Image (cartoon, helix red, strand yellow):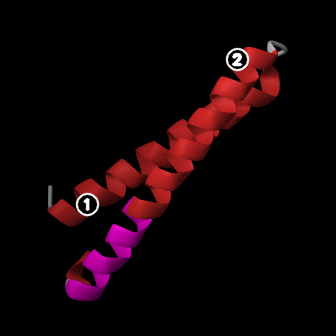
Amino acid sequence: MTVGSQVKTTLAILKSAQACLESFALETQNQEAKTMFENAAKTTQSVVEQVSSRVQQLENEEPQFKGL
């Protein structure tokens, strides 16, 4: 597995985790848990943005990574 495909796989996993956290926040009735899940989702979103930026950088530097 290439670095490009590993980074893209990691990005997909992070997006999935963020979606789960957002779903948990919507489903829970416990306000403390809701806040925790929302904060974790926001933190994960920040990481997603950073990794997405890295994917763009990889694709610009190494065109063979596009579309993987």
Query: Which residue is at 48% across, 62% downward?
Result: 49
Q: Which residue is mark 1?
A: 5
Residue 6 at x, y = what percent?
24, 54
Disc nearer the start of the sequence (2/1): 1
Please, which residue is most extreme toward the right here? 29
For the residue marked with disc 2, what is the amino acid?
Ala
Please, which residue is most extreme toward the top here? 30
Dominant SS type (magenta): helix
Residue 31 at x, y = what percent?
81, 18
Give the magenta part as a residue range.
Answer: 51-61
Q: Is residue 45 above or below residue 65?
A: above
Where, by quadrant of the figure, is residue 65 drawn? bottom left
Mark number for residue 33? 2
Query: Which residue is at 43% across, 43% downward?
Result: 13
The Cα atoms of the two marked residues, 2 and 1, are separated by: 34 Å
Query: Which residue is at 34% across, 49% downward?
Result: 10
Determine the secondary structure under disc 1.
helix
